[in-house]
Amino acid sequence: MSFSPIVAEQALVACGRHCCLCHNFCGTKIELHHITQQADEGEDTFDNCIPLCLNCHAEVKAYNPHHPKGRQFTETELKAHRDNWYQQVIKSGGIITRPEYTEMDRKLFDKIRTTLSSDDAIRFLRNNNYAGFSFERSKHYQLYEFMHKCVNPEFEFIDADLESLKVQLLGKINEFTNVISLNTFTVEGNTEYSWVIPDWEFEQPERFWEIVNNLHSLAQDICDTYDNLIRLGRRKLGVS
């Protein structure tokens, strides 16, 4: 059995076709997951349904209790994530209508533009070449500051569409900074600069270009997602 068309439609409307775990917009790439599995007598009801993106659905299903690694998603946790996101969508309605919500999101929007300046970190990511050239480590500090602030519950949009883009931006920045931390090294004699070791281009070319291309791709993804967030925020919040 599976969820009826009525239950499926109710769940998709309730989540705004966003994943209830990562909050990314899914469109048609969304799954309706049984919180209590059908094999365990889980019912095809609205209360037993949680909409998930394809990646999160795979994560939730992947845990093997016979060979446990990591921490399993519990039924209670899944319901809490789902209910919290449903409430977020209800508050938002996709388009902010209550003045106090608009003002709250405007303040957060301003904080994000201050934290991640288009004239500082974002401009650097647009233009920097990581192919063996050293870069000033401080140029990435705004990325880490943004990640740090996103931990706080106050750093969350009421509007579901803006929050979804902010979460996507955070994910891209997390990926980028992980690659930076694992694959770049301090320039000898100058601790303020790092690089992908230039000698690798000749000694380990496959490794060198895999790292460089990954950094350039992720940097572009960050800039594109940031641009989409700024454009949408300006339209929805009426700011210059």
Image (cartoon, rainbow, N blue to C red):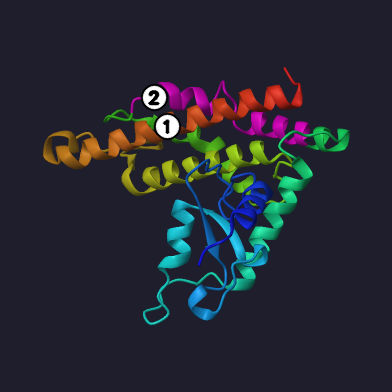
> Bounds of the magenta span?
105-129
Question: Which label is found at residue 219?
Answer: 1
**Residue 180 appears at what percent x and percent y?**
38, 42
Crowding at mark 1 (Cα within 10 Å: few <14, some 14-19, many 20+)? many
Q: Amino acid at mark 2?
A: Asn
Compared with residue 153, is residue 35 higher up or lower down, i.e. above or below? below
Q: Is residue 114 magenta?
A: yes
Q: Could you tell whether 67 is left or right of 77 in the image? A: left
Furthest-left residue in view?
Answer: 203
Q: Earlier in the sequence, mark 1 or mark 2?
A: 2
Crowding at mark 2 (Cα within 10 Å: few <14, some 14-19, many 20+)? few
Furthest-right residue in view?
Answer: 99
Residue at 47 percent across and 58 percent down: it is 57
Residue at 41 percent across and 67 percent down: it is 62
Q: Could you tell whether 202 is left or right of 173 in the image? A: left
Residue at 64 percent across and 60 percent down: it is 81
**Residue 33 appears at what percent x and percent y?**
53, 62
> Which element type, helix, strand or loop, lies under badge 2?
loop
Q: Could you tell whether 196 is left or right of 136 in the image? A: left
**Residue 73 appears at what percent x and percent y?**
54, 69
Q: Is residue 54 magenta?
A: no
Position of the C terminus by quadrant: top right
* Circle nearer the viewer, 1 or 2: 1
Query: Relative to the observer, which residue lies in front, 206 or 2?
Result: 2
Question: Which label is found at residue 128?
Answer: 2
> Which element type, helix, strand or loop, lies under badge 1?
helix
Query: Relative to the observer, which residue lies in front, 43 or 35?
Result: 43
Q: Amino acid at mark 1?
A: Ala
Compared with residue 58, is residue 154 higher up or lower down, i.e. above or below? above
Q: Main secondary structure of the magenta part?
A: helix
Residues at circles 1 and 2 in contact by the CB criterion of under 8 Å:
yes
Furthest-top residue in view?
Answer: 240
